[in-house]
Image: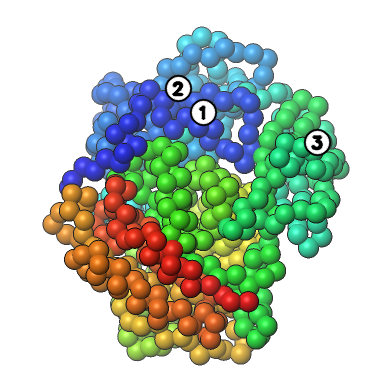
Amino acid sequence: MTQLLTRWGRELKSECPLNDYPRPQMERNSFICLNGQWDYAIYPKNSEFSGYEGKITVPFSPETVLSGVNRTVTPNDVLYYRKNFRFTKTNSRALLHFGAVDYACEVKLNGISLGSHTGGYFPFCFDATPAIISGENELTLTVTDPSETGSGASGKQTSKRGGIWYTPQSGIWQTVWIEEVPESFIESVKITPDIDNGLVNIKVNINGEKSEAKISVLDNGKIKAEGQTLGGEASVSLSDFQLWSPETPYLYDLVIKTDSDEVKSYFGMRKFGVGKDKKGVARLMLNNEPYFMNGLLDQGYWSDGMYTAPSDEALIYDIAVMKEMGFNMLRKHIKIEPLRWYYHCDRLGMLVWQDMINGGNEVNQLTAAVLPAFHLATNSRRLGNIKDTEKSYKLFSREDEKGREEYYIDAKRMIDSLYNCVSLCLWVPFNEGWGQFDALKAEKFFRENDPTRIIDHASGWHDQGGGDVNSFHIYFTPFFFPKRDKNDCRAIALTEFGGYSMKTEGHVYNTEKMFGYRKYSSREQLENALEKLYGRLEPLIERKGLSALVYTEVSDVEDETNGLLTYDREVVKVSIDLMKKINAKMRFKI
């Protein structure tokens, strides 16, 4: 396979890459970044640790080019890390944060165990105060990763990579950092805007001696409103506020103070939902108005960093180019990004649909490919559609009870960590039957934990009749708009389509194989095909009630060459002006 460096990867400073503040949704002045050069070793599980083997650049997984290692950690291996760093101890607590570590790890500081964590996509934190010292400290991690051989969340990683499945990766893949906090500190903040009543509702969770918090809402640096928590909660009234939307991504700053602690955050006044338009047709809604969501599938993979973008500027680039093309939404596909990515969507104005990471054992091709292809070929939504009751756990590769329990643990982690992201408007609990089970129960779980967002409970197929969206994935055949069921009040959306492929010489990962749903040999052919494709869909928005589109996809990924950008982001395959012209037509005309 070809090694492809991005422009940001070529300029990477390995001493401390990705050192931007990692959690803009809850920011403190205290921040010590531990990214950079660590010691590493990879040994089989049945072997003893016998010393470190070299240097790795954190937070890049050892399988990536930018890590400097370029080695695969198999399910039968153990990955070891060590970082020596200096610290000046004060009377404050020291919290050690990990953005994400794939998949299971044990963490020690100066030989003292801080704890362990499982789940490769979620931030976690340890109180390092009992173990940290002034002067030189030694931080070590022991990591294992079953990848697709386990039943937990593994996404699109597989040791049998190819087509739409990608090279597995392991270990630390997001920022590692320390912050100092007082003995009694703000542990979490939950922000819920209420545009109907002109309020922002704030819940403050304090670790340690309980106290109340003062809330200040700032508009361009000036105090707009203030409030005080009672029992940890406050409703702050806002008058003459500006709504957030992709067209006007207006954010208010937030300062939360207790007697001993202070954090900064931000929020946008917006509301998501599903409602009827003037013709009585179900539509996706933004701020109580029908709003056409026109976006792309976004895998979030990089040619040199895989799960990890080479820089903050790289994260911004994808969002900014897609917005310049006229798209207003990205569906983050089977991956959770660092919090900075969502922050950039918030401030730039890009709606986000967030997929849950698929788990279970290896995807069953009968349920994930054969039966869906059958019902698409016969133009029937129901033919080949499996009800995911307990009897179908085997068909969906969900027989393992522990894996099903872990799904809900992970879903709660995802909801909690992303709740304050302004742009996130829709959850996708399951995609195309990959590890799907009890989808209606999952929908209820998401609804109970976050009633403020839309839910596409079974994206693509194996619809269980729940959620807010009747969701279709159609690549090979024209989209025949479904006959509306009078009892189905969901909005209708084409949540994957297109996948038009064009190989760009010198910018492909696999020079021998390429994957796409229709292949084109020139830019002109690709652009003409895109114009025709969107031209066939545009009338369905007004006449039929099509509420959203998700084109496949933002960039090429490994064998996939169906991106609007190449895998290394060096080539924009289609005219930005042309896409802007096409997308200007793809909207609901009020």
Q: Residue at x 77, y 25 (%)?
A: 260
Which-is-in-front pick, marks 2 and 1?
Answer: 1
- In the displayed structure, would residue 6 be above or below residue 557? above
Q: Residue at x 24, y 57 (%)?
A: 559
- Gap between marks 2 and 3 measured at Cα: 34 Å
Q: Pick whichever of labels 2 and 1 is earlier in the sequence.
A: 2
Marks 3 and 1 in Cβ contact (< 8 Å): no
- Gap between marks 3 and 1 measured at Cα: 26 Å
Residue placed most toward the observer, 83 or 568: 568
- In the displayed structure, would residue 405 be above or below residue 92? below
> Secondary structure beneath disc 2?
strand
The residue under label 3 is 213
Residue placed most toward the observer, 151 or 282: 282
Q: Residues within 10 Å of mark 3 (few under 14, many from 20)?
A: many
The residue under label 2 is 139
Callout 1 amino acid: Trp
Q: Which mark is residue 145?
A: none
Residue placed most toward the observer, 215 or 70: 215
Instruction: Point out the image quarter for the C terminus.
Output: bottom right
Q: Quadrant of residue 478?
A: bottom left
Q: Residue at x 29, y 62 (%)?
A: 562
Q: Position of residue 334 (x, y in %)?
A: 43, 57
Which-is-in-front pick, marks 2 and 3?
Answer: 3
- The type of colouring in the image is rainbow
Q: Residue at x 30, y 78 (%)?
A: 476
Q: Pick whichever of labels 3 and 1 is earlier in the sequence.
A: 1
| 211 displayed left or right of 469 | right
The residue under label 1 is 177
